[in-house]
Image (tube, helix red, strand yellow):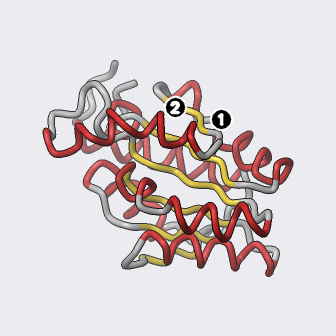
Amino acid sequence: MGTGTLSDKAKDAAKRIADELAAAEIKLVASLPDDWIAELIKTLDADARFIHVPVNREESAVGLCSGTFFSGTSSLALMGASGLMTCVYAITKVNYTYEIPMLFMISLRGAMGDSAKYQVSNGLYLDALLKSINLPYEVVDSRDKLRVIRGAYRHTRVINRPVVVALTRDVLRGEA
């Protein structure tokens, strides 16, 4: 897998993800902190191709990204899995009711490989929650699948609803 340090690998992974987001023509990124996506947030914040807006609540990301749709600005809400789980009401009320497309990118916390016991509930309930509200999602578990980001963004526009791209720890760390 190469001899770079974990930090170098994570930086490379973040750069690859940023390139995919740029290829999807994403301009604005609203983010909430999560330790797995910290390097990605830092990379996007420093990248002139994006306007990065840190938000203090997940629902604020939904509101901001939904509003950018009406200005013709492509956007992304970036957060942890637990953050997405808190957005169900905002998504179903705003995005589903008014058919507003939106791309979410989340860290797949609580999945196999996550050693944080407090994230277990994400792994137990995320899949069932997304299915219960018919929220399409794709898991990116290798760098070969990063092109899914572009397809997911296009799909939001086809269905006029949100789509989620979930990134595994190994992808975010540059190990997959």
Residue under numbered circle 1:
148
Q: Is residue 30 above or below residue 71?
A: above
Q: Is residue 145 above or below residue 173?
A: above
Q: Earlier in the sequence, mark 1 or mark 2?
A: 2
Q: Residues within 10 Å of mark 1 (few under 14, many from 20)?
A: some
Q: Could you tell whether 96 is left or right of 48 in the image?
A: right
Residue under numbered circle 2:
140
Q: Quadrant of the C terminus?
A: top left
Q: Please name whichever residue, 92 or 142, is drawn nearer the observer in this view of the structure.
A: 92
Q: Residue at x 67, y 68 (%)?
A: 27
How many marks do you count on the picture?
2
Residue 125, horizontal then vertical, whole percent? 38, 38
Q: Residue at x 49, y 77 (%)?
A: 60
Given the image, on which type of amino acid does mark 2 rest?
Val
Q: Which mark is residue 171?
A: none
Q: Please name whichever residue, 153 or 17, is drawn nearer the observer in this view of the structure.
A: 153
Residue contact between numbered discs 1 and 2, judged by CB atoms under 8 Å: yes
Q: Please name whichever residue, 124 or 37, is drawn nearer the observer in this view of the structure.
A: 124
Q: Residue at x 32, y 64 (%)?
A: 33
Q: Secondary structure at mark 1?
A: helix
Q: Residues within 10 Å of mark 2 (few under 14, many from 20)?
A: many
Q: Is residue 2 above or below residue 124?
A: above
Residue 104, horizontal then vertical, whole percent? 56, 54
